[in-house]
Image (tube, helix red, strand yellow):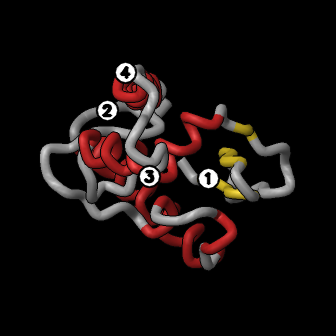
Amino acid sequence: MIFSRSGNQISLIDIHNPDNEKRKLEPWFGIVLQLADGQHTVEELFNLLSHKYKGSPPANLKETISSVVERLIKVNFIMLTEEKTELPYYLSMPYEHLDIEKAKKLLLEDRTKLVDNFKKDGFQQL
């Protein structure tokens, strides 16, 4: 998901209509979404966030992070992979740091490839 960061608030944004209302995420969802970079494990995410509590994280931190990760997977905002994965440019940083024209171009190219692959594999377009 393309996300926007304003201060501590993480929101989802429509790259084609950025002036539309942003969909604000609950803090834990925003934290995990912006840290889901394809290069780190869930365990590394837990360790990183544990350090923010200066050695005494809440007892339920691991369960909270696991629950957030599972819920983000369920709504297809993130996915887990077995190996490190390079994120597409348009997912690699907040909207405010993207070259928007480049991001739109690469997003369109990826969508076109996806549709072509679906057609090749015998799927119908919806």
Residue 115 in sight:
no
- Residue 63's disc is 4
Judge depth for marks 2 and 3 and give the one in front: 3
- Classify mark 1: residues with Cα within 10 Å, few (<14), some (14-19) or many (20+): many
Residue 80's disc is none
Of the two numbered discs 3 and 4 on the same chain, state the one appearing first in sequence: 3
Dividing the picture into quadrants, the one containing residue 19 is bottom right
* Distance between the alpha carbons at the discs numbered 3 and 1: 11 Å
What is the C-alpha distance between the residues marked 2 and 4? 38 Å
Task: Say if 103 sits above or below 17 in the image.
Answer: below
Between disc 2 and disc 4, the foreground one is 4
Q: Position of residue 122 (x, y in %)?
A: 25, 34
**CB contact under 8 Å: marks 2 and 4:** no
Residue drawn at 19 percent across, 57 percent down: 84
User: Tag 1 or tag 4, which sits nearer the N-term?
Assistant: 1
Which is more toward the observer, 126 or 28?
28
Could you tell me how far apart the alpha carbons at marks 1 and 2 are, in whole angstroms?
29 Å
Of the residues under marks 3 and 1, which one precedes in the sequence? Answer: 1
Q: Are marks 2 and 3 in contact (CB under 8 Å)?
A: no
Q: Which kind of residue does numbered mark 2 sit on?
A: Phe
